[in-house]
Every structure is written in structure tokens, then in C-alpha cells.
Image (cartoon, grey):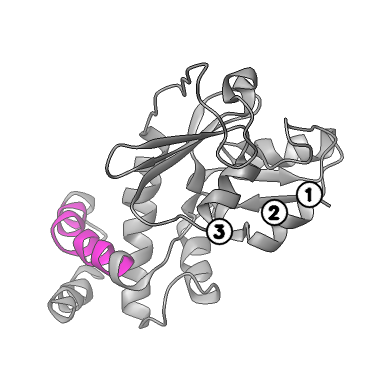
């Protein structure tokens, strides 16, 4: 299947002078190929950290998020991620996170409703929702229970907009503390995170896939 789509990709390279036709071919051939490669060969790719298609293509070659790919496969993957996944991320709207007074953080045991700015949630495929009083505690739980997850949501610190946790950027080491002390402060885009880091003496801006158990443990030191 991938070989057939690859052959189609070779034909398309000469068609980009005709935008309408080229887009039709992308929709029918290239994007499905890129999606299949993404599903089969990649753990995750944070598209929002790249500011251009070329940067994304170069990033795919440098990072370990995807297994080794042929150049043509990388191009199909990059086109799918840039033209499809990136747009889906920018247009997806998630509902506000609402918790009852009964919900407790499964990690620290505190009532979550007392800290509305910091609430984050994991929802599993069976519909079960678990709430946390900060991303730090959510990640502690996630590292041990990461199967069957439908989505994980967090709130942007300044805007309180609900964001998919995997798409967010996080500032660590700032002078802004959460309910459990040093926290992963979430933002929708990298630029806002960098501005916050400068304003609040932060140490680093991290994408989701850079958050490791070691990073989280260090926040508690």
C-alpha cells in the first residue's frame, strides 16, 4: 500500500504549478500516505514547534519521534502534518473544564475545585474522567497509567483556554507556583510561553514530549 502511494508521490512532484489539481492529488494520495506513515511509524510529532514546512521536514530527520524513513516518506509525512494535523490543532475547540466539589486529585488528594486555574483532566476511552490540581500531578499519574487515553486537557495559564495537553508548551522553574509548589505552567503556543518565561524568571520552555519522569521529579526538589 505504501509503495503504491509512493509512486503517486513521484508523479505529484511535477504538478505543483497547478494549485487546484495538485491539492486534489494531495487530498486523494499524499495525505492518506502521510497519515498511514504517522500512525505506523511515529510515536508523536509536535507540529506547533515548527514555523515552516521546511523546518518540520528537517525536524523529522533529526528527532527520534519517528522510525527511520525514506526521503519520500518523510516528505509525505511532513505534508500531512503541516497541511492537515497543524490545521486541525489550530481549529479544534475543547469545552471548558468543569469539576464538582467532590473531585479529588488522585495524586495529592486535594479537592480540585479550589484551584480552578490549574485544573487538568485525563479522559479515557471508556468515558472515565480523572481530574488533577496541576499538570505536574497529572503527569505523575500519566507515566503509570497511559493506556486507553482519549485525550488529556489543560488550561492555558493566562487565557484559561482549554488546550490538548500534547499540543501545549510548559514553563518550568518560574516564580509562579501552583497548588503543589513548582509547576508546569501551560500555554497554547511557544511564543506566549517564552514571554512568560522572561517575565517570571523561568528556566525552560518544554513541549509535551520533553516532559520526563526526571523533569517532574526535579520540580519537587
Task: Read off the residue under disc 1.
Answer: 220
- x, y percentage for residue 130? 45, 36
Badge 1: residue crowd in 10 Å (few <14, some 14–19, many ≥20): few
Q: In the rendered structure, which segment of residues is drawn in magenta?
A: 21-38
State the CA–CA distance, disc 1 to disc 2. Answer: 7 Å
- x, y percentage for residue 53? 45, 58
- x, y percentage for residue 123? 38, 39
Q: Are marks 1 and 2 in contact (CB under 8 Å)?
A: yes
Badge nearest the viewer, 1 or 3: 1
Name the secondary structure under disc 2: helix
Q: Nearer the viewer, residue 60 or 79?
A: 60
Q: Nearer the viewer, residue 38 or 178?
A: 178
Badge 3: residue crowd in 10 Å (few <14, some 14–19, many ≥20): some
Sequence-wise, which precedes: disc 1 or disc 3? 3
- Residue 25 within the segment the image draws in magenta: yes
Name the secondary structure under disc 1: loop
State the CA–CA distance, disc 3 to disc 2. Answer: 13 Å
Q: Nearer the viewer, residue 186 or 143?
A: 143
Answer left or right for 185 relative to 199: left
74 to 173, vertically: above or below: below
| Res. 196 image quadrant | top right
Image point (29%, 65%), residue name:
39
Task: Read off the residue under disc 3.
Answer: 209
Badge nearest the viewer, 3 or 2: 2
Secondary structure character of the magenta stretch overall: helix
Answer left or right for 130 relative to 179: left
Q: Are marks 3 and 2 in contact (CB under 8 Å)?
A: no
Task: Read off the residue under disc 2.
Answer: 216
Answer left or right for 220 relative to 119: right
112 to 154, vertically: above or below: above
Sequence-wise, which precedes: disc 3 or disc 2? 3
Amino acid at each position: 500500500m505504501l509503495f503504491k502511494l509512493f509512486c503517486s508521490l513521484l508523479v505529484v512532484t511535477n504538478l505543483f504549478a497547478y494549485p487546484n489539481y495538485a491539492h486534489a492529488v494531495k487530498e486523494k494520495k499524499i495525505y492518506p500516505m502521510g497519515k498511514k506513515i504517522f500512525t505506523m511509524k511515529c510515536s508523536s510529532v509536535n507540529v506547533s514547534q515548527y514555523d515552516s514546512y521546511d523546518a518540520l521536514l528537517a525536524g523529522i530527520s533529526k528527532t527520534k519521534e519517528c522510525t527511520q524513513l525514506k526521503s519520500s516518506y518523510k516528505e509525505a509525512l511532513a505534508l500531512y502534518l503541516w497541511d492537515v494535523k497543524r490545521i486541525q490543532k489550530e481549529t479544534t475547540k475543547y469545552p471548558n473544564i468543569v469539576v464538582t466539589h467532590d473531585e479529588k486529585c488522585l495524586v495529592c488528594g486535594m479537592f480540585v475545585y479550589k484551584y480552578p486555574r490549574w485544573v487538568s483532566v485525563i479522559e479515557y476511552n471508556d468515558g472515565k474522567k480523572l481530574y488533577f490540581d496541576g499538570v505536574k500531578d497529572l503527569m505523575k499519574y500519566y507515566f503509570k497509567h497511559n493506556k486507553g487515553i482519549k485525550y488529556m486537557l489543560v488550561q492555558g495559564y493566562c487565557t484559561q483556554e482549554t488546550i490538548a495537553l500534547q499540543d501545549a508548551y510548559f514553563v518550568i522553574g518560574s516564580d509562579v507556583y501552583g497548588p503543589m509548589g513548582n509547576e508546569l505552567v501551560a500555554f497554547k503556543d511557544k511564543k506566549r510561553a517564552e514571554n512568560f518565561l522572561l517575565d517570571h524568571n523561568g528556566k525552560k520552555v518544554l513541549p509535551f514530549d520533553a516532559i520526563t519522569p526526571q523533569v517532574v521529579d526535579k520540580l519537587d526538589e
